[in-house]
Image (cartoon, rainbow, N blue to C red):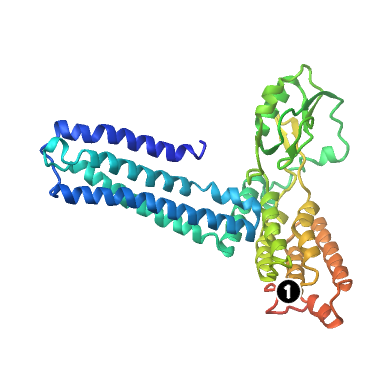
């Protein structure tokens, strides 16, 4: 559902109730009245209506200022994430609904000179006011979540959820189960391409793939679908989306595109690289000369290391889908372990070369990854990256003493040195 529909539903429901409930009370429940003078009831409802509009203006002006501030301080890619928080739109709807229903109820106070104050409508306005205050408190809580520690934790939680859903743990995989991509990697042929799907339209980003739907279509035609684009890629006009190999008949392009979900920007769904990308954005922005906040970069590395530790214990070869008979039908490009390392550390290493704190934290992260990696090739890749980090420190503008300090492992950046057994 589009987010702007949320406040519109609140407003529509409030207007419908305002047109029917007070009228029903006046016609059939006139004996039920609120023990309050007409003047007091009018003052009460007027205060609620005017106060809700003033509260709406103040709260949402503050909310959008905080969101813009966070975008400048953290990453512009976080703007839509916070601005599209459903709590914000539910609050807007509740505030507007309370305002509208209070006005409708006010119109039925002393209706026809009866001197009556509708009981149920007046009570309902009070309930809506309390509910609005509850949403207001929730909105304030959401604003406090814009603190850097909360932002990093939220991004990390999103990444942990994606990793848990997409990748199987290596220690949970049956020993007899072969690597699903080993056949392809060793040179398995899928046959010549019989059909190529080309994208036509405005630039859009692949948010997710329905691999099951693609596999069923490929099975019906005895084909293998090879995706030319991965989740997170931006499709431009004329981009090759996929190629169909060995199909008996051409597959309907409309059905193929329905299995590829496009959006205007990247999302966390099926994209474990995206949370790492956001964490790296926050880290390198904190390392810019305009901000100069290496401690925030260290906090971002904490979350990045946790995500990489989880990836190191997972089967990353998840870019394959089979049909009900176990035949390979869909091949999707997936990032390798080296891709994750490059994404996670390269830019932080480049922009943090002059920071002893960041170098020490990077070294601690890489050392920790070598100890937790369950695949020897992944541990070797981390050791190679660790040697590269030492080479960068040697070529940095730091003096000899600072270079020696930068080579020490410290999970706090600067706070607790951890030397190896040899030094």
Does residue 55 sit above or below 409 in this rendering?
Answer: above
Which of the 4 quarters of the picture holds residue 265? top right
Q: Position of residue 27 (x, y in %)?
A: 15, 31
Q: Which residue is mark 1?
A: 357
Q: Position of residue 45 (x, y in %)?
A: 25, 48
Q: Position of residue 397 (x, y in %)?
A: 86, 74
For the question of whether residue 324 can be seen, the reply is: no
Total tally of numbered discs in the picture: 1
- Horizontal side of 233 relative to 188 (left or right) equals left
Element assignment for label 1: helix
Q: Which one is in front, 3 or 155?
A: 3
Which of the 4 quarters of the picture holds residue 360? bottom right
Does residue 169 sit above or below 145 in this rendering?
Answer: above
Give the residue drawn at x 74%, y 68%.
Answer: 289
Give the residue drawn at x 71%, y 58%.
Answer: 280
Give the residue drawn at x 77%, y 69%.
Answer: 363
- Horizontal side of 85 relative to 25 (left or right) equals right
Does residue 218 sit above or below 398 in this rendering?
Answer: above
Q: Which one is in front, 159 or 84?
A: 84
Q: Which one is in front, 120 or 369?
A: 120
Does residue 6 sit above or below 169 in this rendering?
Answer: above
Which residue ends up furthest to the top in the rendered image? Answer: 249
Give the residue drawn at x 59%, y 63%.
Answer: 148
Which of the 4 quarters of the picture holds residue 136? bottom left
- Horizontal side of 32 relative to 158 (left or right) equals left
């Amino acid at each position: 559902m589009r987010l702007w529909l949320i406040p519109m539903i609140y407003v529509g429901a409030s207007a419908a109730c305002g047109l029917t409930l007070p009228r029903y009370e006046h016609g059939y429940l006139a004996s039920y009245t609120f023990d309050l003078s007409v003047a007091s009831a009018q003052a009460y409802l007027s205060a609620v209506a005017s106060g809700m509009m003033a509260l709406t203006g103040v709260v949402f002006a503050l909310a959008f200022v905080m969101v813009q501030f966070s975008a400048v301080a953290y990453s512009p890619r976080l703007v839509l994430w916070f601005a599209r928080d459903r709590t914000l739109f539910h609050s807007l709807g509740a505030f507007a609904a309370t305002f509208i229903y209070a006005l409708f109820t006010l119109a039925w106070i002393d209706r026809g000179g009866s001197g009556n104050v509708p009981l149920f409508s007046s009570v309902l306005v009070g309930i809506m006011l309390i509910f609005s205050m509850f949403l207001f408190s929730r909105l304030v809580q959401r604003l406090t979540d814009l603190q850097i520690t909360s932002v990093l934790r939220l991004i990390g939680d999103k990444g942990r959820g994606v990793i848990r859903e997409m990748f199987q743990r290596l220690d949970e995989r049956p020993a007899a189960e072969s690597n699903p991509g080993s056949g392809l990697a060793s040179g398995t042929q899928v046959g010549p391409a019989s059909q190529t799907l080309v994208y036509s339209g405005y630039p859009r980003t692949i948010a997710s793939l329905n691999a099951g739907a693609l596999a069923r279509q490929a099975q019906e035609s005895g084909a293998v679908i090879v995706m030319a684009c991965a989740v997170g890629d931006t499709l431009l006009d004329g981009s090759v989306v996929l190629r169909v190999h060995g199909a008996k008949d051409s597959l309907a392009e409309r059905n193929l595109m329905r299995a590829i979900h496009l959006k205007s920007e990247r999302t966390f769904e099926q994209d474990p690289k995206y949370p790492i990308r956001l964490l790296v954005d926050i880290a390198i922005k904190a390392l810019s000369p305009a901000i100069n906040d290496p401690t925030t970069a260290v906090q971002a590395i904490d979350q990045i290391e946790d995500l990489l530790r989880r990836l190191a214990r997972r089967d990353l070869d998840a870019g394959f889908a089979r049909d009900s008979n176990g035949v390979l039908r869909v091949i999707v490009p997936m990032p390798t372990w080296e891709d994750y390392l490059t994404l996670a550390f390269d830019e932080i290493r480049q922009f943090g070369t002059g920071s002893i704190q960041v170098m020490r934290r990077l070294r601690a992260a890489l050392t920790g990854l070598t100890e937790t990696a369950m695949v020897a090739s992944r541990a070797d890749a981390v050791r190679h990256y660790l040697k590269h980090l030492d080479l960068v420190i040697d070529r940095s503008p730091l003096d000899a003493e600072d270079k020696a300090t930068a080579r020490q492992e410290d999970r706090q950046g600067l706070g607790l040195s951890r030397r190896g057994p040899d030094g």
